[in-house]
Each structure stands twice: as structure tokens, then as C-alpha cells.
Image (cartoon, coloured by chain):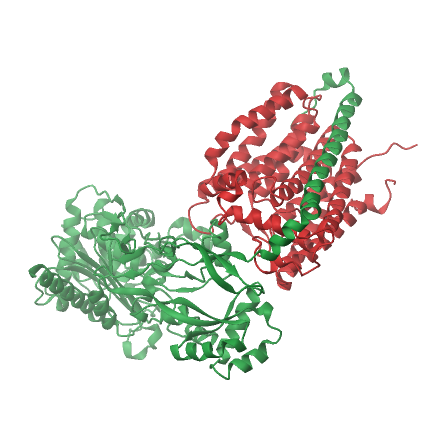
Chain colours: A red, B green
Amino acid sequence: MNENSLGYRIHIDFILLALIFVLCLCGLIILYSASGQNIDLVYNQATKLFIALLCMILVAQVPPANLNRLSLLLYFFGVILLLLVAIFGDVGKGAQRWLDLKILRFQPSELMKIAVPIIVSSYLSSRFLPPKFLRIVLSFVFIIVPVVLIAKQPDLGTALLVAIAGFSVIFIAGLSWRYLLSVSIISALSIPSLWHFMREYQKQRVLTFLDPEKDPLGAGYHIIQSKIAIGSGGFYGKGWLNGTQSHLEFLPERSTDFIFAVLCEEFGMFGVLVILSIYSLIIFRALYIAYNAQDAFRQLLAGGITLSFFVYIFVNIGMVTGQLPVVGIPLPLISYGGTSIVTLMAGFGILMSIHTNRKFLKR
Amino acid sequence: MDLFPKDKVEFILKDRDTESALIKKRIHLSGLLILLFVTILLSRIFSLTVLENDHYTTKSKENRQKILPIAPIRGLIYSRDGVVLAENKPTYSLEVIPEKISDIDLLIEELRGIIHIGEEDIERFKKLSGKKRRFERVPLRINLSENEVALFSINRHLFSSVDVVEGFIRHYPLGEELVHSIGYVARIDESDLRNISKLDKSSSYSATTHIGKLGVEESYESYLHGEVGYQKVEVNAEGRVIRVLERIAPQSGKNLYLTINLSLQRIASESLGGRRGAIVAVDPRDGNILAFVSSPTYDPNKFSSGISAESYNSLLSSKDKPLLNRVIQGKYPPGSTIKPFLGLVALDNGISNNEEEVWCPGWFTLQGHEHRYRDWKKEGHGHTSLDKAIVQSCDVFFYNLAYELGIDRIYAGLSKFGFGEVSGVDIYGESFGLLPSREWKRNNMQQVWFPGETVILGIGQGYALTTPIQLVKATSAIATNGLMVKPRLVLGINSPGEEGLTLMSNSTENKIDVKNSLFWDEIIDSMESVVHRAGGTAWRSGLNAEYFFAGKTGTAQIIGIDQEEEYKEEDIADELKDHALFIAFAPVKKPEIAVAIIVENGGGGSKVAAPIARKMFDNYFVNRDLTSRE
């Protein structure tokens, strides 16, 4: 590869782009079946993906150094928007809609999924790593403020993702094992206080996770049905459009959070292997980019984005297979849904920018 | 500029490479962790899909249990004395699951053999099935008669993909009489769905088909809707329900009781007799709305059963704008009804007092200007005090008064009465009206404020626009010596079967402070004389009344008339004629009712609007006396 190749000039990493493209295509095929062959829904998703891809290309043009410079501004802009939502959000119906671009709706909490890893990377990389105790505490403050605001909206799923994005960066920054252990203990202890922020339905979800049979009419039903869908798929699946669980309406949230169960039912273990391979290739390409990034900020940011992308996948699949409680986290780039696609693609855009803005010494 | 500058000294001392090596170690570690977790996921899925495949395949085949949501029954709406205003009528509809049909046109053709299916039914079906998932039911025919239900039941074996579904349809027995206050329900559309999911109520609405669209049906949706129920059912391989295994009953919505006084409402709408206009009456003490008329009106029942595009378009394009809720959205120049409010603002600012008199020759000019601002009375009112100026509605006095007050003090004073602000009534969609100020003009017209604009504001002309609900709220404030109370349509709620009523708390916002509380009496006295003193602009309407009331007429000009021209009613096209306005409250001593009346293009306020108020008051007090005598 060299600095003058096409990819470097237009700041696109073709390997990553190709992998994402294949994944989106698979996603649309699954969505067509999951939505009950609603072609309008598929077109709608395709449009969203297309816009998100454009967004990715746009973000890829921003040099990483600029992100570093703008980190604080971006972060506070996001926090102020979140505060506005908190203050005015409940006034009237529809007031929480911030920027309605008809096809895509902009939520400040989505911005934070990007802004938090950027600010933490920027802050931690400004001093020598590994970070000292006080700097870790301050990074936590950067993460906790938006997380609490988002959790209060209440959007527990997104709050969790923002927290994960921030912590991923701290982990990559070389947080010592001693601290890592204490962080785990602190977060374990803070679960009761998180409980306080939860709405009734969210508490119910956690309780249901602990004992799905207890609430077979409500959320427990989701998990039971989802497991049946996955388990009945077998190795090769029942075939595209032939999933009985989804088409006879046994499986809830088929096209959004539980779309992975549709994949399992119709394409079986084989389909899962294919999709997880694509995901893994994307992740390892991204880790490669992080590994070869040219300063601490870029390394941290790239690593943080990649880790949190994996956590999304893990949490969603864990939820659908009944290993984790039901939190509303979609399967990245496959679930039907608007803003989060744009955020994900923006993250990939940052990775591409990091990779294509490297400077090589002339030999 | 770097926000977090690297510590230069530290950097010289330490090596960038060790830092990079540390991060690279962590990235390696992340890769290993990810591999580990992917393996965990894969082994979990492997055990589900391959090892336990037999178990789950059996379960999937036996999976005949389905959870179906049951829609709650929407709360009813009553008048304050228990007359049903919105109810749920049982109805049968013919519903189809598009996924199961290969040729819809053929099916319709076959169904037409037994049941009438019109073009509009097909139109609606096509529209709805485009929006829904292919395995969700879509109504093909609604409002089946019992006869049709029986006919279909006999032939049901021929149509495996068609069902008769029992449901409820919202019915408004009084139809168009109350649509502007009650609103209506209509099929949930995409923007409703977005709102519902934003409020985290998606599961609560999973079986609901209709939602409140306007009026209290919309604003009290959360009370009326109720909580969804569920039933666990056994289905056959085609998905048809065989039996119910378990059931959690839905919780019906709450019933609403409106503040509307039906007999007063009827008198008011009859008095308008289909002319364009609005009438709103409130109890000034608690803001309870007694009558709420916006004319012309339309039938809400058409909307709840799904209005055809044709009827909807004809409503939309009608010149009389029946869909416009004139009470809260109609914006009218207040005309002379602004005078008592301005009088009070002037008294409070020490600009005027009842001894001071102004000479009215029939016109007013600004110093150094030629333009004559004319009085409605060509020959003038002569020596005029504030009292006489209100009673006879002298324009020149108020031109002068407005000029002396100046726009800033007028703006501040009238703001206190709620002009230019929403009244806070408990339904959505209210207009702000317009109370102009220097700032408003600068922002909206990029111009400075001209003194002449202050002058005509004195008689409620120019930029100022009010809604009838603002006018009645401000009138109530005079009646109660300054109490600003939010008007409301809902008196209270209760649950079905519950005795008694949980009253909605009434919301007094604040009290308008004036320097001397006698100012209120002065203005009220003058408003009483408008009606009860010979020569008052509404004296005919006050003749032989068994109670005392106070009011103010207004005639709002829509077109400018040239300096020398004369306004001749018969020469002017209907839609350019003046609006007739009247505000009033009664009884003067202890006010129980305040009204604002606007008859669009009706002509003079004293001739057209004031008699309506008299009729309403007569009705109100006669009925009240009858009930108290019982």
C-alpha cells in the first residue's frame, strides 16, 4: 500500500467497505423475510443504509487530528443537547424529536456514542500512558455524565452502549489490572443504584431474564419463543422465508431486536457461521487499523470503536439466545432501524480516516 | 490549538515506543478476548441449533400457543350532567390477511356474491394493506349489518383467509355539535405510531386500531385509552385461534366528564345558525368552559369509521373552513373589545382618570400629520371621559389614549391579560394570536414601529389578532378583578363503574395586579353601562333583563376604507364585511359566566353579536333558577 493509492487519496479503506457492504446485503435479505416480505420496509432500510454509507464517507474525510482538536467541543455540544432533552423533552408529545429529517431522526444520545470515545481518547492520550489514577477518575466523569442523562430519558440500551464505548477506550489505554478489578467491583456495586433509574418495565425485563418462566405472557415469552426459533433451525435452517416461528407471529420484534433469531431459524448454524465470520473479519480489520495507527489518540479511538462494535453484537446475540437480559440493543447493520445505523457507519468512517491519514517516511 | 496539550517534558523523558507497545499489547489482548467470546456465542448457538435441535423442533411444531393482545375499551365521554357524548358501538368487520391471499381481486369478486363491497372499501383496503405487515389483518369491509354477518357465517367455509372480526367503533351521538371540543378518533397512522413508540407505549397500543385525533379525544388520550390485555391462545397450523388458554383482561380507559352545558351550547350554536363564527362561554371562577361553538362544523362519525378521500377533500376545500377550530385557532382583530382592557392599562399607568376629558370632533390626527383617523361616529362624541368612551365606544378617545400610552406600555399591559399567548386550554392546537411590539415588528417585518400603528391599536385594529378563547379568558379576568384561570373542557374523570368523580384541579395561573383595585370597578361599571345605560352600544340587548350584565361590543374592520369614502354595508362583498364581536359577563356583582362571541363578516357587534349573549345569559340563568328551585 502506498500513500498515493486511490484508497488513501479518497480516504476509503476498500477492504472494510467491501465487508460492510456484504454484511448489509445479507442483512437486507434477512430483513425481507423477517418483515413478512414487506418490500417497502426493505427499501426503507436500504435507503437508510445508503445515507449512512454516505455519512461514513463524509466522516472519513475528517483528519483524526481535527477530531482530537474538536473533541471537547463535540462532547459539550452533545451534553448540552442531552440537557435540553432532559429539560424540555417531556413538555409535549413529540418534543423529544430533535431533528426530524423525515427518513432519519437525530437523537443527541446517538452523538454521544461517538463523542464519548473521542473525548476519552483525546484526554487519556494527552499524557503518558498508562493513565494515572486521577486521570482514570476524570475519564469516568466524562463517561458517567452523558450515561446518566441518557438513562434518565429513559433509554437504558443506548446508555449502556455509550458507557461501553467509553470503557473500551480506557481498557485499550492500558488500565492496569489492579484498577480493572476495582472497576468491575465498583460497577457491580453500582447496579443497585442503576436499578433506581430503571422504569418499571426495565426492572421487569431484568427479573424476567433471571427467571423467564415466571412471566410467560410478557417478556419471558420473547425469550422462550426466540430460543425455539433458534433451536428449531438446525444446521442448515428451514430455508429463506420458511421460518414458522417468525411467519406465524410467534416471534416478537422480528425485524428489530430479535432479527438474529430469524437468521438462526431460516439459515441455521450455517447462516450464523457466515454472518459471524463477516462480523469477525470486520472486527479484525478494524483491530489491524487500530494496531497500525500512528499515535496514541488514534490507537485508542480506533481500538475503542472496534471493541464497542463487538460488544453490540455480543449483547444482542447474548440477549436473543437467552444468555443476557433483554435490553433494547439492535444487531448492528442488520436490525431494522434508523439513527444507530448512521452512528455505526460514522464510527467506521473514523476508522477509515485513521487508516488513510498515516504518514510514511520516504525511503 | 490542542485542548489537552501533551506534557512536553514528560515526553522527552519517556519513550513514545513503550506507550505504543502497551496499547498494542492491549489490542492483541482485545483480539484474543473477542475470539473467546465469539467461541462462547458459537458454542451456545451450536448447542441450541444442533445438539438440542430435536427438542426445539418438537417444540416448534407443537408451538400452537400464541400471545394475542386485547385492545382495551376506550373510556366514554359524558357531559357534566351525564349525557353520553362519545360511546363505543359494537361493529363487525370483514378482515383479511394479505399474505394468505394469492389473488385479491378474485377474492373480492367472490365475496361480492354474498356481501356488498364498494369501491371505497377497496380503496381503503389497498391503502391500509400497503402500510401493514403482510401477516396482519386488514379490514376489507367495515360496519357489517347483522344480516351480512349471518350470510357470511353460512359461507365461511369457502373463505379460509377471511374472518368476521367483532370490534367497537367510536360513535358521537351529538355528531357535529361538539366536534370542535371533543374531536374524534381515527385509525392510527404512521406519525401516531412514531409518537407511541417514543412514549414507550408500543406494547400498550398493540391491539388498538384507533387513536384520539383532536380535541379532548386527543389531549386526554392517556386517560381514555386504558391498558392492553393479553390472551394466550391455541392456534392451528394456519394460525387460526382454536381456544383461549389464559387471559389477562384489558383495563378500560377512564371516562371523561366535560364542563360543557349542553343547553347553553345548543342556544349558542343555534344563534350562529351556520354562519361562520365562534362562541365560547366560561365560568370565570374556575375556567370551566360552558359552551364551545365553532361554526360551521362537521360530522366526527365520518372520521371514526374512516372518511373517504372525497368527503375529506370537500371538507378541506370548503370556503367556510369547517375543519378550522375557530375558538382556539381563529385569529381575529379584537376591534373595540380591546377598549376596556386598554382603559384598565391606562388607569394603571396613571394616563387617564375618570375626570379627564378628551374632545372628540369625529377624527384624530397625529401632530404634524395630515392623516385623519376617523371615529365610527362621523359628527364626533364631543367631550368624552373614559367611561363615556367605553359606553359609546368612542374611537378618538382611544386613539389618543393609545398614543399617550405608547406601544411598550400597551404591550406590557395587554400581555398580562394573556393576549399574544395561548390560553392553556386543555386541548391541543391553540394559536398564539398576535400582540404586536416593537421587537416583533423588527424581527418579522424588519421595520421600526410607527406611531400611527400605536394609534389604530387603540381600537384593536392593525396587527393585533386574538382568538376567541383568549378574549374570553381576558374577559373573565376583568369579571374576577384580575384572576387568570386556564380554561378547561374536562371537569373530571372516573373509572367505569366508579361512583363519583375525580375532579381535574383547576389551574389559576396568577392574579393581575393593579395599583388601585377600584380601577376594576370603574371599568366594570362602564361595561355595565354599555348594556344598561341608554346610549350604550349594546343597550337594546340589555332591555328588561332580569339580571345585570356587563359587556363590550366590537366591530372589526377587514378592509381599509379611503379617507373620504364611506363604509356602506350593502356595497361590500360578504367576505369583506366587518366581523361582529361581543364580550360580556354576568351577573355583574358575582360573575358566573363570561362569553366571547364572534360572527365573521356579520356586520356590527351591537346589532349582531350582543343579542346572542343576551339569549345565552337568559338561557343560563333561567335553567339555573329552575334547577335551584327543584
Residue at position x 54%, y 32% in the image: A145
Q: Left or right: B55 with respect to B277?
A: right
Quarter of the image with the N terminus of chain B in it: top right
Q: Left or right: B421 with respect to A290?
A: left
Instruction: Check the image and report above or below for B566 versus B428.
Output: below
- Relative to the observer, which residue lies in front, B238 or A88? B238
Quarter of the image with the C terminus of chain B in it: bottom left
- Relative to the observer, which residue lies in front, B579 or B548? B548
Q: Is residue A211 visible?
A: yes
Residue furthest to the right: A363
* Residue B323 in the image, given as x and y percentages of width and height: 39, 68
* Residue A108 in the image, given as x and y percentages of width and height: 56, 43
Q: Left or right: A121 with respect to B253?
A: right
* Residue A201 in the image, given as x and y percentages of width and height: 47, 43
- Relative to the observer, which residue lies in front, B255 or A207? A207
Residue at position x 37%, y 64% in the image: B184
Instruction: Check the image and report above or below for B548 versus A92.
Output: below
Picture quadrant where residue B568 is located: bottom left
* Residue B205 in the image, given as x and y percentages of width and height: 46, 56
Picture quadrant where residue B331 is located: bottom left
Instruction: Check the image and report above or below for B124 versus B221.
Output: below
Picture quadrant where residue B391 is located: bottom left
Q: Left or right: B376 with respect to A42?
A: left
